[in-house]
Amino acid sequence: MKSQNQSSVFYFILLGFSNFPELQRQLFWVFFVDYLVTVLGNAIIIVVISLEQSLHVPMYLFLLNLSVVEVGFSAVIMPEMLVVLSSEKTTITFAGCFAQMYFILLFGGTECFLLGAMAYDRFAAICHPLSYPVTMNKRVFTKLVMFSWVSGIVVATAQTTWVFSFPFCGPNEINHLFCETPPVLELACADTFLFEIYAFTGTILIVMVPFVLILLSYIRILFAILKMPSTTGKQKAFSTCASHLTSVTLFYGTASMTYLQPKSGYSPETKKLMSLAYTLLTPLLNPLIYSLRNSEMKRALMKLWRRKVDLHAF
């Protein structure tokens, strides 16, 4: 295997959808609006939960952390992507590509574990309501949040460092919209078989294991909801869980197809679209799913708005 100092590539070229220039111009404005709505929507969730004391419970504090992750995801990917879509080819430095991949993996790994923790929180609240205050106390919540973030950091550090330890001696064109692991790895001029085994195993542990646990939690939750005597209680529980399950299915489904597929599994364009689904659609939909379908969030938002109007009146 060649050593790292034999790399002759000092920057990469992101091709985007350069084969479809007309499509790129249209997508620029679509993604620009997506970026603004995503940042604004998640920022509102962060502010509302931070300022409203009644929402300082695990369910909403998990949501606050999830919104921070979504803002980070968008900030890491979208500005560079908009530059790519506004030109035929865009260069990104070796260090810039490393940093972008690192934070994509950090936020992606953190989101995997956060969604799992949120499913456990709903399971404990619905299936064991009497013991919920003990099961999900402040100490347990803090440990779950810290575990999610630390796991994301560990995954990002290990995988990004390993990918960029390979020599890159040309070509340097990444047929993608941003520096994601699979398309960058294709440019390495070394045997990456061992890394691919690690990446596949890691994806199973980080993506599929939490996903299976989430599904099992929701099966238990479904049976618990069906046993509820109150129709109102059933509707409220279904509404809360449907929001989370929608987000989970979208994120895990597209992420697993991206990282578990064989190299020749899909065309480059299909891979780009699948990556966009979990890096752009999920951050966009989360504030809509959790806010518009959640009466407590809407009440808290209106309460803060009225408080602001009253302050201006005086």
Image: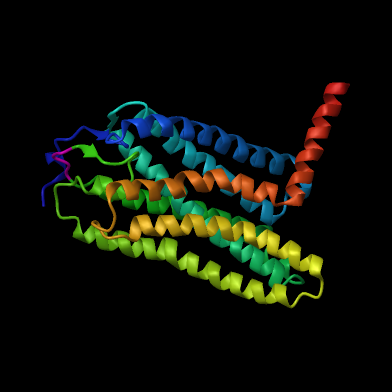
Q: Is residue 15 above or below residue 125?
A: above
Q: Is residue 24 left or right of residue 93?
A: right
Residue 147 visible in rendering:
no
The magenta stretch spans residue 104: no
Residue 275 visible in rendering:
yes
Residue drawn at x 60%, y 58% as measured from the top left: 244
Residue drawn at x 78%, y 36% as measured from the top left: 304
Nearer to me, 86 or 70: 86
Q: Is residue 272 left or right of residue 127?
A: left
Would you identify the image quadrant in which residue 236 lies?
bottom right
Q: Magenta segment, which residues? A: 167-171
User: Which percent across, then down, holds residue 39?
Assistant: 56, 36
Residue farthest to the front, as pictured: 22
Q: Is residue 203 above or below residue 43?
A: below
Q: Is residue 5 left or right of residue 11?
A: left
User: Which percent across, then down, holds residue 246?
Assistant: 57, 58
* Colour logic: rainbow
Q: Main secondary structure of the magenta part?
A: loop
Residue drawn at x 81%, y 75% as measured from the top left: 229
User: Which percent across, then down, holds residue 275?
Assistant: 39, 48
User: Which percent across, then down, holds residue 279?
Assistant: 45, 46
Residue drawn at x 82%, y 71% as measured from the top left: 230
Name the image quarter holding the C terminus.
Answer: top right
